Amino acid sequence: MKIYVVLMSLCLVVGGCSQLPKTSSSTIYIASDSTAADHTLNEDYQAKRHPVTGWGQALQAQLDVLPVAQRQQLFGAKQLLVANKARGGRSTRTFFEEGRWDEIYRNLQPGDWVLIQFGHNDAAVDKTERYTNIAAYKQYLRLFVQQARERQARPVVLTPVSRNYPWMEGKLGNAHGDYPAAARDVAQELAVPLLDLGLLSAEFFSAKGEAYVSSHYFMNLPAGKYPAYPDGLKDNTHFQPEGAAVTAKLVVDGLIPLLQPAH
C-alpha cells in the first residue's frame, strides 16, 4: 500500500532529530472531532450510542504494541499516554471557542505531542453553529501549531479521515472539499509534520471494498442487533470498533516513517 505521508521534517521543528529530548513518558493529545473522540465518556453510551468508536479510542492499544526502543526513537519517550480531547460536532473554531484547545495548551509539557485533525464539521455549511470557512480553518490550524510549539510540544497536522463516500469505480473519493488541501498548505507553510490520513484511509478502505467497509468499519447497522439502534442505522462517517482500530493503526503506521530520524 502506498503511504501518502508528506514528510515536513520534524528536524525543522525541534532543531535536529538527534536532539529529541529523552524522557520516560510523553503525552499524545488528540484535538479533533467525533471521528476520533472517546464516545464511552458519554453517560448514555451503552443505551444510545454503542458501538460507535472513535479512532482515538483505539490509539493507545496501537502505540502499546510498538517496541520500547522504537517509541524512544520516534517519540523521545519509552512510555506514551494518549489524552483524547476530541469532541463530537466540533470544528477548529468551536474547539477553540469552547476552551477545549486552551485545556490542551495549559497542560502541554515539553516533549508532548498533539495530533490535530479537523475538517468534517468545519465544512458543514448548513450548520452555521460549527461551519468554519477555509481561511478561518487555516488560521485556527496555524494557531494550534504555533501555540503547541510555544510549549515545546510537537504538533502533527492530519487531514480528515475519509468518509465512506463517494465511491467511484471501486475507489473512495474525497468528501471534504478543499479542507484536506488547506491542511496540507498549513503544514507546508509552517514546516510541521503532515499525516495525510484522508488519503491513507481512502486507499486502505478502497482496497477492502465498499461492501466490507460499509458493514464492518462504518456505523451501518442492521435492525435489532444493538439496543441503541433498534431500527438499525446508516452512518457513513462514524466507526464501529473494527473501523476505529484499523484507522488507529493507519495513524501509527503513518507516523513511523514521518517521525523516523534522519541518518
Image (tube, rainbow, N blue to C red):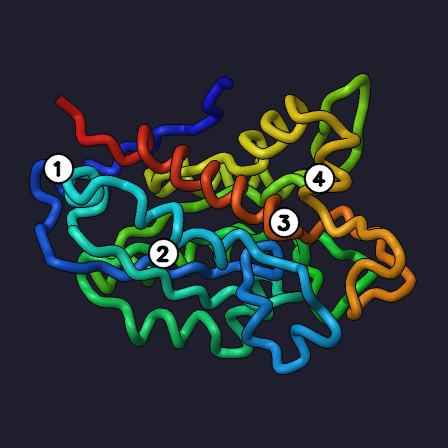
The amino acid at mark 3 is Ile
Q: Which residue is mark 1?
A: 16
The residues bearing labels 4 and 3 have C-alpha atoms spaced at a distance of: 10 Å
The amino acid at mark 1 is Gly
Residue 255 lies, in percent from the top left, at 36, 37
Give the mark toward the camera: 2 or 1: 2
Is there a contact, CB below 8 Å, between mark 4 and mark 2? Answer: no
The residues bearing labels 4 and 2 have C-alpha atoms spaced at a distance of: 24 Å
Residue 134 lies, in percent from the top left, at 63, 49
Is there a contact, CB below 8 Å, between mark 1 and mark 4? Answer: no
Q: Secondary structure at mark 4?
A: loop
Local crowd size for mark 1, using a 10 Å CA cut-off: few (<14), some (14–19), many (≥20): few
Q: Secondary structure at mark 3?
A: helix
Residue 21 lies, in percent from the top left, at 10, 51
Residue 137 lies, in percent from the top left, at 57, 54
Q: Earlier in the sequence, mark 3 or mark 1?
A: 1
